[in-house]
Amino acid sequence: MLGNSPVFLFLLVCAVGLGWLVVIFNRLVALNARVANAYAQIDVQFKRRYDLIPNLVEVAREYMGHERQTLEAVIVARNSAARARAAAASNPADAEVMATLSTAEGGVAGALRRLSAVAESYPDLKASANLAQLSEELTSTENKVAFARQAFNDAVMNLNTGVRSFPAVIFAARFGFKEAGMLEAIGAANERQAPDVKLRA
């Protein structure tokens, strides 16, 4: 009988094994796609934040022209983070790229905190309606970044678990899948909060 022949059994085992590999591969593809999608959500918020920062600096410049170093530090940090963002957009599952982006984002948060601290000594600047509106929009964007970062890190955790789980761990590297890097908030515990840039009196 055909069902008992060694050739049939061999073909059946091969078909089951191939089906099993296809299921593993497709699962890893789906997990990788979720990481890319989650990064796209963060990317939208990063772009919004990077678009707001020059406006914030320009308004502040009107009042604090002699604080040039502080203003330039914000722009330098923003430009560095924008370059890191562009690199991350091309490969959001790369752990090294995410580490660079995390560091750059920490630089932006630190520069904004320094700007906020310096701005406290300028009552006219604190009273500026334009600055208050920009600060509110920036704070709202920071909150959205935090939520999007959590969703991204959840997707990364699922991918990393999938890559490390048996039996996928046997084939993941051969299929070109590797662990992704989390997007961390950099700095001390108080730096893990959104920068407080509300400069109202």
Image (cartoon, rainbow, N blue to C red):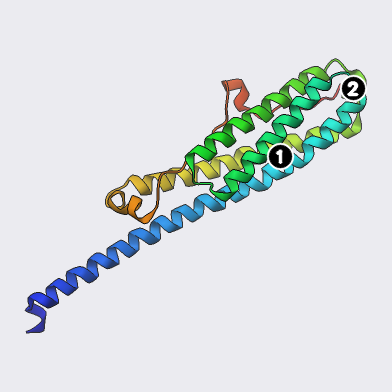
Image coordinates of residue 4 in percent, x first then y, are 7, 78
Q: Is residue 88 left or right of residue 96?
A: right
Q: Which mark is residue 42?
A: none
Q: Is residue 71 left or right of residue 84?
A: right
At 83% across and 20% down in the image, what residue appears? Answer: 119
Is 107 or 33 nearer to us in this picture? 107
Report crowding for label 1: few under 14, some 14 to 19, many 20 or more residues within 10 A (C-alpha). Answer: many
At 27% across and 51% down in the image, what residue appears? Answer: 170
Instruction: Tell me which amino acid carries mark 2.
Output: Gly
Indicate which disc, 1 or 2, sits on the residue closer to the N terminus.
Answer: 2
* Residue 182 appears anywhere in the view: no
Q: Which mark is residue 65?
A: 2
Residue 67 vertical placement versus 179 (above, below): above
Instruction: Tell me which amino acid carries mark 1.
Output: Thr
Quadrant of res 10: bottom left
Residue 189 vertical placement versus 22 (above, below): above
Q: Which residue is mark 1?
A: 141
Mark 2: secondary structure: loop
At 57% across and 47% down in the image, what residue appears? Answer: 39
Image coordinates of residue 180 in percent, x first then y, are 45, 43
Report crowding for label 2: few under 14, some 14 to 19, many 20 or more residues within 10 A (C-alpha). Answer: few
Mark 1: secondary structure: helix
